[in-house]
């Protein structure tokens, strides 16, 4: 194996740059030429790449986003698109590929692997919905941002005796909502994986209002409901004046946390090491504090839910679910 490629795909997450840096530097160290594809699978289909030097990845370990750009590429979901992508990579003499992205991007990686390319995946998505890894790159930075934002909002909530309904990202995953509800001491969390009863939530919030609680934070994952919808249903029943805050894309970027820098650096090097040693069709995962190689088939076939223990933890600590 002489030449490897690297790409970032799907929703960007903070730490993708640290992962690119690790792939490029370890790839060069192991004697590979490293091509960085621009805009994920779009760059593969268009053979749009740049040859990466060690200096190409200087000064990026702390930066959110991705210097290789990311994209969603519908064409790559088709058999034809995947076959063209495979042919384009072969034409460029690419022997191995590192795909950095979320669940969808890893499905694309698996398609290339099934066509015969040597591919290793690195999980990177704020949603933390990829099976086979305790943490994906970007989750920790994102949770720090959400926690900062909610701590800030809490100042206003208590000054004005308001309930804030805060919408966090997670199209199909409530991981960010549950974890931030624990970290912020929220009153309630609403997630797509768990049935919720707004009447029960409303009654409990109004009890807390009557007991003299001066503020209230209700975190809702976008995949469960819109925060405005929850506000409409709760506002006349809970005592508190209500406001909505949709955190949106401030959750995805930002200076990469120490945890994500280290996770991405280690996963990037593990991915290139696997390729060098002739292992592919796997995703690098973090399991019980150890780096593991999880077959793509396991990643594809299983769903990463939220551990029931986390719900219990949130409930025990006072979060209404
Ligand atoms: P993420 O990787 O963050 O989950 P998406 O689900 O949007 O983000 O997927 C990113 C890209 O990965 C898609 O735009 C597409 O190019 C590719 N992809 C997604 N699903 C598949 C699939 N089933 N087969 C092949 N490629 C896919
Ligand atoms: O998959 C990551 C994610 O941030 C989801 O949580 C969110 O629903 C989606 O991407 C938003 O995508 P876009 O940036 O395309 O609006």
Image (cartoon, rainbow, N blue to C red):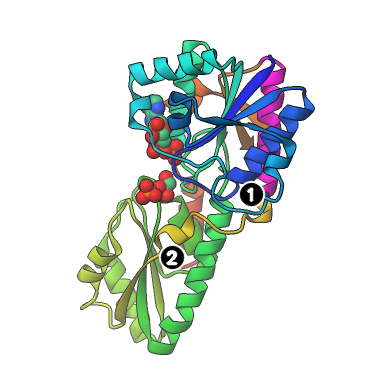
User: Residue at 49% across / 48% down in the picture?
Assistant: 126
Q: Estimate the x, y position of residue 170 in percent, counting from the top left.
A: 40, 50
What is the tally of numbered marks visible in this picture?
2
Can the viewer see residue 317 in this picture?
A: yes
Q: Which residues are magenta?
A: 260-278
As rendered, which of 204 and 185 lies closer to the eye?
A: 185
The residues tagged by marks 1 and 2 sit, at their Cα atoms, a distance apart of 27 Å
At 31% from the left and 82% from the top, the residue drawn is 240
Q: Is 85 covered by the magenta stretch?
A: no
What residue sits right under mark 2 in the picture?
A: 319
Where residue 66 is drawn, which disc sits there?
Answer: none
The mark nearer the N terminus, 1 or 2, is 1
Vertical placement of residue 285 versus 228, above or below? above
Q: Is residue 39 left or right of residue 256?
A: left
Give the structural element (helix, strand or loop) at label 1: helix
Callout 1 touching callout 2 (CB < 8 Å): no
Q: Is residue 226 above or below residue 69?
A: below
Residue 198 lies in quadrant:
bottom left
Q: Nearer the viewer, residue 101 or 88?
A: 88
In the picture, the quarter occupied by the N terminus is: top right
SS at mark 2 in the image: loop
Please tell me which residue is depicted at 69% across the width and 16% down the height of the picture.
2
The magenta stretch spans residue 267: yes
Rendered image quadrant of residue 6? top right
Residue 33 position in % (x across, y down): 69, 24
In the image, what residue occupies the spot 32% across and 51% down? 223
**Disc number lying in front (1 or 2):** 1
**Residue 316 in view of the camera:** no
**Residue 113 percent coordinates (x, y):** 51, 17
Return the residue at label 1. Answer: 260
In this view, 199 is above or below 122: below
Principal secondary structure, stretch drawn in magenta: helix
């Amino acid at each position: 194996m002489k030449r490897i490629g690297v790409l970032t795909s799907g929703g960007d997450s903070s730490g993708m740059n640290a992962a690119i840096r690790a792939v490029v530097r370890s790839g060069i160290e192991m004697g590979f030429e490293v091509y960085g594809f621009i805009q994920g699978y779009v760059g593969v289909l268009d053979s749009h790449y740049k040859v990466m030097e060690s200096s190409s990845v200087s000064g990026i370990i702390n930066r959110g986003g991705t210097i290789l750009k990311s994209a969603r590429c519908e064409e790559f979901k088709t058999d034809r698109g995947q076959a063209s992508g495979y042919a384009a990579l072969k034409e460029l003499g690419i022997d191995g590929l590192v795909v950095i992205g979320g669940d969808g991007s890893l499905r694309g990686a698996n398609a290339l692997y099934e066509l015969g390319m040597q591919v290793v995946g690195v999980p990177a998505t704020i949603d933390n919905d990829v099976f086979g890894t305790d943490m994906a790159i970007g989750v920790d930075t994102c949770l720090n941002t959400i926690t900062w934002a909610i701590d800030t909002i809490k100042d206003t909530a208590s000054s004005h005796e308001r309930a804030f309904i805060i919408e966090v990202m997670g199209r199909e995953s409530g991981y960010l909502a549950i974890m931030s509800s624990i970290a912020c001491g929220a009153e309630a969390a609403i997630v797509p994986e768990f049935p919720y009863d707004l009447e029960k939530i409303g009654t409990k919030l109004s009890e807390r209002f009557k007991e003299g609680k001066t503020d209230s934070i209700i975190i809702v994952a976008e995949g469960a409901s819109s925060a405005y919808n929850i506000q409409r249903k709760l506002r006349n029943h809970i005592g508190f004046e209500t406001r909505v805050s949709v955190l949106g894309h401030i959750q995805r970027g930002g200076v990469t946390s120490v945890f994500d820098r280290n996770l991405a650096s280690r996963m990037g090097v593990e991915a290139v090491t696997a390729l060098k040693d002739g292992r592919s069709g796997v995703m690098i995962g973090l399991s019980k504090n150890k780096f593991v190689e999880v077959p793509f088939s396991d990643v594809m076939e299983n769903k990463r839910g939220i551990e029931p223990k986390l719900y219990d933890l949130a409930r025990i600590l006072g979060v209404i679910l």
